Image (cartoon, rainbow, N blue to C red):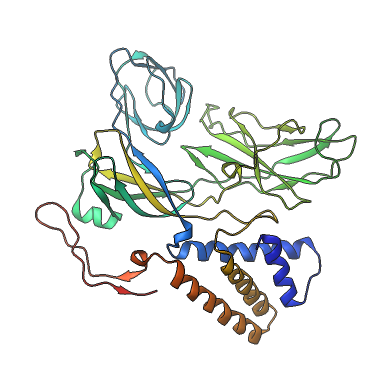
Amino acid sequence: MNLKDIVEEVNNLLDYNPDLQPYKDATVRTVNRHYQEISTQSPWLFMQNVTDFPVYAAVVPTATQTVTITTPTREVVFTGITPSPWWEGALFTGPDTGQYRIRRVVGSSIYVDPAYQSGSVAGSASWGITFDRYALPSDCSEPLGFMDRENDRGRLLFMDRRREEELFLNADDGGHVFVLIEDLHISDRPPEYAPSIALSAGGTLPVGVEFEYCYTFTLEGRESPPSIPVTGAKTTVANRTQTLTDLEDTRDSAALRTGIRKNVYRRNKNGNGRWLLLASIALESTTTYVDDGSVTPSVYETNVLAPQEPRQHVRGYYTSNFDEKFELRYLRKPRRLQADSDVPLWPEQYHVLLVYRTLQDACMQSGMTGQATMYERRANDVLQRMKGKWLARSDKNIIRQGFTYGGIGYFERWGNPRKTG
């Protein structure tokens, strides 16, 4: 069942379909709320993914690898070495021994936060890059396991901050990573205001279509939640260009470049299409964007507006002295169902669960408590069948005894597990 089928099934069982866009939007929001909640509440086999998870050794410069910083600035220019994209989010230690978070890598330059605190320097080899934390994939809801297959060390231990604080795994200790520690969950603010929009002559946008626009910020490899969307006037034969204005100027209070990019998204409102990436604006001072139809956004999944939840980070212990690559297995966060053709990432026989949960909410809101109770029972029955079939046996929620620290090395001593769901 795609999103259109789910909404039509809800309307059919309610015997109510006013054919109003606000009503459909409300129904879609309810469907997505249950879809995202159920998808992330358990480690479903069909919601898991595996990807490479690299860790990096600190970058120590040679005498010919230098930096030039002309204050006041947030930009650091390198000579003799090209900054790598994975430096974004790492710490830059400057010639003044201060540490700055790398927001963006562009060519031979990086942009740091905060602005450089000392005087200008030219051709200095007194700098370094350290990787104190690593961002998990943007669609990661929960890490389920880290494996070191390259060095045949098997499954690595993953622990939370509280346990690390009790054991005091010092970040100054270097070596091979054998423990991954839960670190910060970071979220970024969205643009403060919706952009303005105006329809003008010329262009090649399709005729008779209402397009909706929003934009986000990108920094340190993370994407912010979107701005409030704005809808343009319907295009005509003569007027087929949409101009966005009042995009936020992302320079800092001193008008310095910050490295924050703006990503502009567009969707076909008439066809209930997806939010697709239209353009990425690199210059912070740019506050306008013209959509004349010359850019056709890709429908590839990486260009679809993704859920912007707090981005989880981890750090390694020991702090890595080597470039290594692990295998990460994780529970995916589902993308919102946006277009009529979008299909839940579930086995098809369980799509009806979203119908029942949506009907339960609709009946409860209308005061039909008997009908709401009936759909709740039906939904619970489907959910139990889905749990019995599609929960990884070893990943089911269990109650265990506490973690015990061994005198020689680190190991886990658990009591007998008991299933809870």
Q: Residue at x 81, y 65 (%)?
A: 19
Rendered image quadrant of residue 390: bottom left
- Give the vertical position of 40 relative to 186 (above or below): below
Residue at the extreme right: 238
Residue 275 location (% of width, % of height): 66, 47
Q: Total marks drawn?
A: 0
Quadrant where the N terminus is found in the figure: bottom right
In the drawing, does residue 232 fall left or right of residue 45?
right
Residue at the extreme left: 407
Q: Nearer the viewer, residue 363 or 172?
A: 363
Quadrant where the C terminus is found in the figure: bottom left
Residue 355 location (% of width, % of height): 64, 71
Q: Is residue 113 visible?
A: no
In the drawing, does residue 168 fall left or right of residue 325?
left
Residue 318 location (% of width, % of height): 22, 42
Q: Nearer the viewer, residue 207 or 301?
A: 301
Q: Residue at x 68, y 45 (%)?
A: 194
In the drawing, does residue 302 fall left or right of residue 93?
right
Residue 78 location (% of width, % of height): 40, 18
Rendered image quadrant of residue 346: bottom right
Residue at the extreme bottom: 370
Q: Residue at x 47, y 38 (%)?
A: 221
- Give the vertical position of 34 relative to 249 (above or below): below
- Give the vertical position of 86 relative to 356 (above or below): above
Q: Is residue 417 visible?
A: yes
Q: Residue at x 27, y 51 (%)?
A: 155
- Give the vertical position of 310 relative to 79 (above or below): below
